[in-house]
Amino acid sequence: MAKTDKDGCWLDARGKATPVEYINKLDIEKEELIVGKIHKALKLSKQLTEFKQECASDIDGYLKHLAKANKVRENWKGNIALRSYDESMVIERSMNDRIEFSEGLQLAKAQIDVWLKNRLGGLDLNLTKIVSQAFNVDKRGRINTAMVLKLMQLQIDEPEWQKAMNILKESITVASTKMYIRFKIKKDGETGECWENISLDFANVGDADAKD
């Protein structure tokens, strides 16, 4: 229930005390609703956290046993899909890296700008636009990571460009890795068999981020 002082009076957000008998009955009903549901939500969140940790541990244990049985070394950091014997159930574990860049990012940008000016004379408007979009920042001051990484996929063999890409590559760091675990079962639908997700939002509960 609401926070109270030593006399049992309810305290509001500013710390003002009000005797319970003067509290509106609807406010008391609302308080019971909110507190009850929040406590239940916290309990469920804890259960999800514990289940996620259990799943992660059991999957790691199985994969280590599998590697040992096949006499191979494997740290299994990547994505994996485990299927039941009849392939009607699947557990998918995927890892999503959060990428950050060091100060080398600006050095790479400067190198690219020099190359664009000297090698292309500023005439390749399409490439200039791609570079500009990659290094533009949003309202929070963040760049488009996907666009920056896409630059390294461009097939440009010019030495100065390759130098810039090497600087860019060295500036990349994996800040954290988020684990996703998904459960799917095969169902018979109107158009045949289809996969149905078992809805559990594991992305934001417990230790979702794990340092490499």
Image: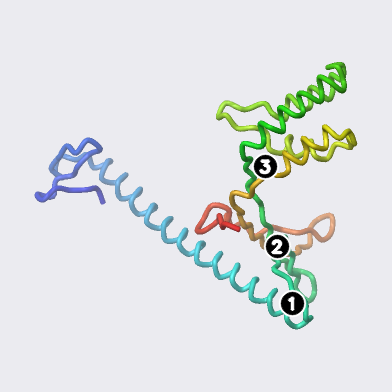
Disc nearer the start of the sequence (3/2)? 2
> Pointer 3: what residue?
171
Q: Label 1 is placed on what type of residue? A: Ala
Q: Secondary structure at mark 3?
A: loop
Q: Is residue 144 left or right of residue 48?
A: right
Residue depicted at 27% across the width and 41% down the height: 27
Q: Label 2 is placed on what type of residue? A: Glu
Question: How far across and down, in percent of the image, does residue 125 sit?
Answer: 84, 19
Disc nearer the start of the sequence (2/1)? 1
User: Looking at the image, do the residues carrying marks 2 and 1 touch, with CB atoms under 8 Å apart?
Assistant: no
Q: In the picture shown, does residue 129 fall above or below 165?
A: above
Residue depicted at 63% across the width and 27% down the height: 137
Neighbour tally class for label 2: few under 14, some 14-19, many 20 plus, Cα within 10 Å: some
Disc nearer the start of the sequence (1/3)? 1
Residue depicted at 77% across the width and 41% down the height: 166
- Disc 2 to disc 1, how far (Cα)? 18 Å
> Pointer 1: what residue?
67
Q: Is residue 4 left or right of residue 210?
A: left
Which mark identifies residue 92? 2
Q: Quadrant of residue 25?
A: top left
Which of labels 2 and 1 is toward the front?
A: 1
Neighbour tally class for label 1: few under 14, some 14-19, many 20 plus, Cα within 10 Å: some
Q: Is residue 28 left or right of residue 157?
A: left
In this view, the residue farthest toward the bottom is: 69
- Disc 3 to disc 2, how far (Cα)? 31 Å
156 or 138: nearer the eye? Answer: 156
